[in-house]
């Protein structure tokens, strides 16, 4: 007996293989790796925490780009008359389909982000400048553990943004709308939310105190806040209450679940809602179909 | 089997608005027995579909029986695709109901007008994916053999011809033995020999039990159907065996019958197609 | 089921990785002390003091600091530099917060105070104690070489016991910080440096006036008339009179002066004293002796005199014997307030040597040394003496002015050419080197060892290996002009200021060479060098101070708000920015978002960046445009003409009313008039308006 979870993974498998076999995705992935590693090397690879600082801003931009590239047409665009109607005739709940698509894509995107950043970190001891061998060092440049925190956070950020892109993909039906919406989401995620906060701050809609928590509203703000607090641990960040960390983590989780829920609701309507009925032939053979009006 | 079907179809045609057709066969035949093929597997009652201001289907009452091929014929915009999608449960009717007898977890198999498959997968992989969504394991090879794609099972979709992709669409629709198969223009744009192969395949599929509903504007295909349903502007304007329709129209070919029934209006409607 | 497996692996890896969120990844927690020799040391002691401390095995408390944003352990000898660096915002930005500070703990040792008042351990060794647990004895009678000493203990009882024996107060760490900051270093700004220079000019002016009075002594003996030889004349002359040496050559001169007389020739081109070619020509062993208006030749070759009476146990015995007792045109020892003027010395060894004599003034002297420099030696040498050397010319030889423990010496208005070092300071603090011109040297002005509070002001160096190279700390390198050297200015000191220098046409403009960047490098004009800067050791240096950086010619960016600062950080050592002046087209690349990203994050934790220089507030216009214009117009002209241009800048800029360089009249060796006696920083601007 096939369970819905099996169906989810069947879909995920197909997504995974699709991405592995489609040259465009491979190119995007290679491009991401090259840019991130290039930036890492250009930054000097002087230490783990400096590397995290250097990569923070690029990751904030590149990860949404990657998510858009990998996700904008995964659920809706271009399949509403070809693939999705077919899938709807199979006994698969919407959540399994959306979940499968998400898992398949997220496995690729998250693995890519995780592995690329991990490699960048591993380069530090090899390609970074040699410390003076006659001078005693201590952990001032940050530990690999701190960098690993950054990598995990970036991976989570990628997962969240991908979910958002999937939601956009499900809500918009045609390919052109999907591109436009995905780009809009990208702009919103990368600059829009921050700009809105800056504007709100400038106009006094809310004060700098509440900004701490409001930043958790945008996925990139939450991500940045978590990195600064948990990885870089700047002097200013040390003063940030842990409630802000919790708020940021919750913010990311809400984006993730909300986006997936939205995608599920929009991927296709439930057929049984009205006017279409399935009659169990084995219970009352033929009877229902023919005498239903009586 | 095709001998018996015209009779049933004629009954339906004769009683389009009346619930009179006989169901002796289905009453007496338990599910799974050969005779069950001829029972009604889907029925619409007063089915109407509107898209915004456009009434695409209005008051369609229809019963389709297993083991038969029903050809839905009509001009572009006559409501063929809408009827098929409504039957398959892919859109929500604005009036009336659709009921489908489900013997299995998959009540309906559907093949859209322009089926698309992931280009980087092989035929076998594609079908296996869909098969894996079903409850019970399915022999994919058997299905490929049924539609005649067994020779290209390992070929990638992007290396398939248009006809093969249609066949793959049909194979996908057949998976899981749904009682109702709905196929939208499975042979449009194909050359005559392929078209004939596809309709022959559909007949073979119907012979295994399900009701096959196929939209087509190729009357050559319709001529081989057990039953022809002529749609015009959302209404069923003719319903019966091909022979009966020809006879009713008092002409000597399906082509002429079709022209006689809807021909005058074709030109008018050509400019106001409703895209679904 | 590839996805299932991949998901399982990914989730597994992420879960395992997520354990870093529950473990402590920061560089915190208790640290173990590292071997002190492995730390990067900042010291309160000059090298001279350090050598005394080592020689006598004195106890000087130490500290080890583990910063959050600096990978190396910083060691401190003495606790003043510790408190000073911790209180410095710029330092905090560069290195982050101190995570742990360990200080010496003398509770585990037995302490004593030597006869000289120095702290020493007689038994046991100092261990380490975390600074927050330490208590400190301040204001006790115990000292270290060069200053008071703070004695840390882990136990308050031990501190009290020490205080009861040697006096002083017991304070905790916060108390010590407050106390030390109150008596902290001068701030790193131009004005304090100019004030130091003014004080030293004033002292030199006073010493000059005092020495010049020696030329007013009455003539008592004339050589050739009243006495046959110079030696006989000196023997015959009563103290405080003048021995006249008429024109002519006087051979086989080997004279020792043991009374306060003035020896006056008829002029450097008229009277010539010719030595025996073996050892020195004149030896002065009494105070207030003057030698004027003559030439000296026939100095011996001997650079190291074996049988001289130096304290062979002293840490600097070797230097005293081989440098300070080398054959010389004139040697002074215990000759306070003596005077040498208008004397021309031709020497294969030293020219004028001063030992243990303060207030000796050497002016308008011309020393011809041997070339190449390896053949020659020190044109003037001051050892354990505070001297004034001014308005003189040094041509050839090894070093123009060599100082060894010559604290407070003033070297001004001299010309140096064709030698190893123009001015060479060893173990010498609190000097003023101003208005000198050096050409064709290995290094124009070099300060070695780790002295403090030296001022190098308004000098010009051209065609040399390095223009100005100052080590030590709390020093000022101001308004110098370095042109067409291999390296313009080397930043090799600690907590020092390099400001308003004009660095033009060098191979490398400014070179940073310390492991711990603690200097302020700001308001310099860096133009037309092959490379703006280099900094090969240690972390990134932030070269801007109080929101003002340097003028890097060709630096991309705009000054939209008109505050004189470009709104774009500049990385003079950066892969792109380094070409900004030579290849203007890199400006396009320099303004790319990618560059902005990298640059912005580079400023974030400079203490962890390796190599390179970052100016977060590059200037939009030169600080001293007049100097720059003259240099650019005539890089081959007499460097004095550039220094004159500071007058233009002084009148152009209202920002700095003080102009530390000499007025036109005193820059040449035309005359020593009253302008010398006027404190330079107070020179009215109007004087310079030409």
Image: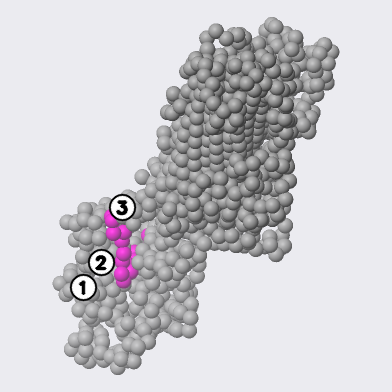
Quadrant in the rendering for residue B172: bottom left
Say whether marks 1 and 3 touch (CB < 8 Å).
Answer: no
Say whether marks 1 and 2 touch (CB < 8 Å).
Answer: yes
Of C76 and C133, which appears nearest the observer? C76
Cα separation between marks 1 and 3: 29 Å
Mark 1, Cα crowd under 10 Å, few <14 / some 14-19 / many 20+, is: some
Residue A152, image x, y percentages: 51, 42
Position of C12 compared to C618: left or right? left
Residue bearing the label numbered 3: A21
Whether C272 is drawn above or below A180: the answer is above
SS state under label 2: helix
Q: Chain of mark 1?
A: B
Instruction: Name which residue lies at 57% across and 62% down.
Output: A192
Q: Chain of mark 3?
A: A
Q: Which residues are magenta?
A: B106-121
Residue bearing the label numbered 1: B190
Residue bearing the label numbered 2: B166
């Amino acid at each position: 007996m096939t369970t819905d979870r099996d169906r989810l993974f069947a879909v995920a498998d197909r997504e995974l293989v699709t991405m592995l076999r489609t040259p465009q995705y491979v190119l995007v992935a290679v491009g991401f790796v090259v840019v991130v590693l290039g930036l890492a090397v250009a930054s000097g690879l002087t230490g783990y925490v400096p590397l995290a600082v250097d990569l923070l801003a690029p990751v904030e931009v590149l990860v949404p780009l990657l998510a858009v590239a990998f996700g904008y047409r995964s659920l809706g665009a271009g399949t509403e008359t070809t693939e999705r109607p077919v899938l709807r005739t199979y006994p698969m709940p919407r959540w399994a389909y959306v979940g499968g698509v998400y898992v398949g894509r997220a496995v690729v995107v998250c693995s890519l982000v995780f592995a690329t950043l991990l490699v960048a970190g591993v380069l530090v001891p090899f390609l970074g400048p040699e410390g003076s061998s006659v001078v005693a060092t201590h952990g001032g440049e940050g530990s690999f553990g701190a960098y690993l925190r950054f990598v995990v956070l970036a991976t989570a950020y990628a997962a969240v943004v991908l979910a958002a892109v999937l939601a956009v993909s499900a809500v918009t039906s045609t390919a052109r709308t999907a591109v436009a919406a995905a780009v809009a989401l990208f702009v919103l995620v990368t600059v829009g939310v921050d700009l809105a906060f800056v504007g709100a701050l400038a106009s006094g809609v809310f004060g700098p105190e509440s900004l701490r928590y409001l930043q958790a509203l945008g996925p990139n703000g939450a991500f940045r806040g978590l990195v600064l607090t948990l990885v870089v641990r700047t002097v200013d960040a040390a003063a940030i209450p842990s409630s802000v960390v919790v708020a940021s983590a919750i913010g990311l989780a809400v984006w993730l679940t909300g986006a997936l829920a939205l995608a599920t609701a929009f991927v296709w309507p439930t057929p049984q809602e009205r006017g279409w009925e399935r009659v169990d032939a084995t219970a009352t053979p033929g009877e229902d179909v023919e005498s239903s009006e009586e | 089997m095709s001998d018996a079907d015209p009779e049933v179809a004629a009954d339906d045609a004769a009683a389009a608005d009346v619930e009179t057709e006989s169901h002796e066969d289905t009453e007496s035949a338990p599910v799974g027995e050969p005779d069950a093929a001829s029972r009604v597997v889907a029925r619409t009652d007063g089915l109407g579909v509107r898209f915004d201001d456009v009434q695409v289907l209005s008051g369609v009452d229809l019963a389709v029986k297993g083991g038969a091929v029903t050809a839905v014929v009509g001009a572009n915009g006559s409501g063929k695709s809408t009827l098929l999608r409504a039957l398959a449960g892919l859109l929500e009717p604005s009036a009336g109901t659709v009921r489908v007898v489900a013997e299995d977890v998959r009540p309906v198999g559907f093949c859209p007008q322009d089926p698309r498959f992931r280009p980087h997968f092989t035929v076998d992989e594609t079908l296996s994916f869909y098969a894996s969504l079903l409850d019970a394991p399915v022999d994919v090879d058997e299905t490929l053999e049924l539609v005649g794609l067994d020779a290209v099972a390992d070929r990638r979709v992007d290396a398939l011809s248009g006809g093969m992709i249609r066949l793959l669409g049909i194979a996908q629709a057949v998976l899981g033995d749904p009682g109702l198969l709905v196929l939208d223009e499975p042979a449009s744009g194909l050359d005559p020999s392929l078209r004939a192969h596809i309709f022959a395949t559909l007949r073979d599929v119907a012979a295994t039990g399900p009701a096959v509903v196929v939209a087509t504007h190729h009357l050559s295909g319709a001529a081989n159907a057990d039953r022809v349903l002529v749609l015009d502007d959302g209404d069923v304007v003719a319903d019966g065996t091909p022979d009966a329709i020809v006879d009713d129209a008092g002409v000597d070919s399906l082509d002429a019958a079709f022209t006689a029934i809807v021909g005058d209006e074709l030109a008018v409607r050509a400019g106001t197609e409703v895209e679904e | 089921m590839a996805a299932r497996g991949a998901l399982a692996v990914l989730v597994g890896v992420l879960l395992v990785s997520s354990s870093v969120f529950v473990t402590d990844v920061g560089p915190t927690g208790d640290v173990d002390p590292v071997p002190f020799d492995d730390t990067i040391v900042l010291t309160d002691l000059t090298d001279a003091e350090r050598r005394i401390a080592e020689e006598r095995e004195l106890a000087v408390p130490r500290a080890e600091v583990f910063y959050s944003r600096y990978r190396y352990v910083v060691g401190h000898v003495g606790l003043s530099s510790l408190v000073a660096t911790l209180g410095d915002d710029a330092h905090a930005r560069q290195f982050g917060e101190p995570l742990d500070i360990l200080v010496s703990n003398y509770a585990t040792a037995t302490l004593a105070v030597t006869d000289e008042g120095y702290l020493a351990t007689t038994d046991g060794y100092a261990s380490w104690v975390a600074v927050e647990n330490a208590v400190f004895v301040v204001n006790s009678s115990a000292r270290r070489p060069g200053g008071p000493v703070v004695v840390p203990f882990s136990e308050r009882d031990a501190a009290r016991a020490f205080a009861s024996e040697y006096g002083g107060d017991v304070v905790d760490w916060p108390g010590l910080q407050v106390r030390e900051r109150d008596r902290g270093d001068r701030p790193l700004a131009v004005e304090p440096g100019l004030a130091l220079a003014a004080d030293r000019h004033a002292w030199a002016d006073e010493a000059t006036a005092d020495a010049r009075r020696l030329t007013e002594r009455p003539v008592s003996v004339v050589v050739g008339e009243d006495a046959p030889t110079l030696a006989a004349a000196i023997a015959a002359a009563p103290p405080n009179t003048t021995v006249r040496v008429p024109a002519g050559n006087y051979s086989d001169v080997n004279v020792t002066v043991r009374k306060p007389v003035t020896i006056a020739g008829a002029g450097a081109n008229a009277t010539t004293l010719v030595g025996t070619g073996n050892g020195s020509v004149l030896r002065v062993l009494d105070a207030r002796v003057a030698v004027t208006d003559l030439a000296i030749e026939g100095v011996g070759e001997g650079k190291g005199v074996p049988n001289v009476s130096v304290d062979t146990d002293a840490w600097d015995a070797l230097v005293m014997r081989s440098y300070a007792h080398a054959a010389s045109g004139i040697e002074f020892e215990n000759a306070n307030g003596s005077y040498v003027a208008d004397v021309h010395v031709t020497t294969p060894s030293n020219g004028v040597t001063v030992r243990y004599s303060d207030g000796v003034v050497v002016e308008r002297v011309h020393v011809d040394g041997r070339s190449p420099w390896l053949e020659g030696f020190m044109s003037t040498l001051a050892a354990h003496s505070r001297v004034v050397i001014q308005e003189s010319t040094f041509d050839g030889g090894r070093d123009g002015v060599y100082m060894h423990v010559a604290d407070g010496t003033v070297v001004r208005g001299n010309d140096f050419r064709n030698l190893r070092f123009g001015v060479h300071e060893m173990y010498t603090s609190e000097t003023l080197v101003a208005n000198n011109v050096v050409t064709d040297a290995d290094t124009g002005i070099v300060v070695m060892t780790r002295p403090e509070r030296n001022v190098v002001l308004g000098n010009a160096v051209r065609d040399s290996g390095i223009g100005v190279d100052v080590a030590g700390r709390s020093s000022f390198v101001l308004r110098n002009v370095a042109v067409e050297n291999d390296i313009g200015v080397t930043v090799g000191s600690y907590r020092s200021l390099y400001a308003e220098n004009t660095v033009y046409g060098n191979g490398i403009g400014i070179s940073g060479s310390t492991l711990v960047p603690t200097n302020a490098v700001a308001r310099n004009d860096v133009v037309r060098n092959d490379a703006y800067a280099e900094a090969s050791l240690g972390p990134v240096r932030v070269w801007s101070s109080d929101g003002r950086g340097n003028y890097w010619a060709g630096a991309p960016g705009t000054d939209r708000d008109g505050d004189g600062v470009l709104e774009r950080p500049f990385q003079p050592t950066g892969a792109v920015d380094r070409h900004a002046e030579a290849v203007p087209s890199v400006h396009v690349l320099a303004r790319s978002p990618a560059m902005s990203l990298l640059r912005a994050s580079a400023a974030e934790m400079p203490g962890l960046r390796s190599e390179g220089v970052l100016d977060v507030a590059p200037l939009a216009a030169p600080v001293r445009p007049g100097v720059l214009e003259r240099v650019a117009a005539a890089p081959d002209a007499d460097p004095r003409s550039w220094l004159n241009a500071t007058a233009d800048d002084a009148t152009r800029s209202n920002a700095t009313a003080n102009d530390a360089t000499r007025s036109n009249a005193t820059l040449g060796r035309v005359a020593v008039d009253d302008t010398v006696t006027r404190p330079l920083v107070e020179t009215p601007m109007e004087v310079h308006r030409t």
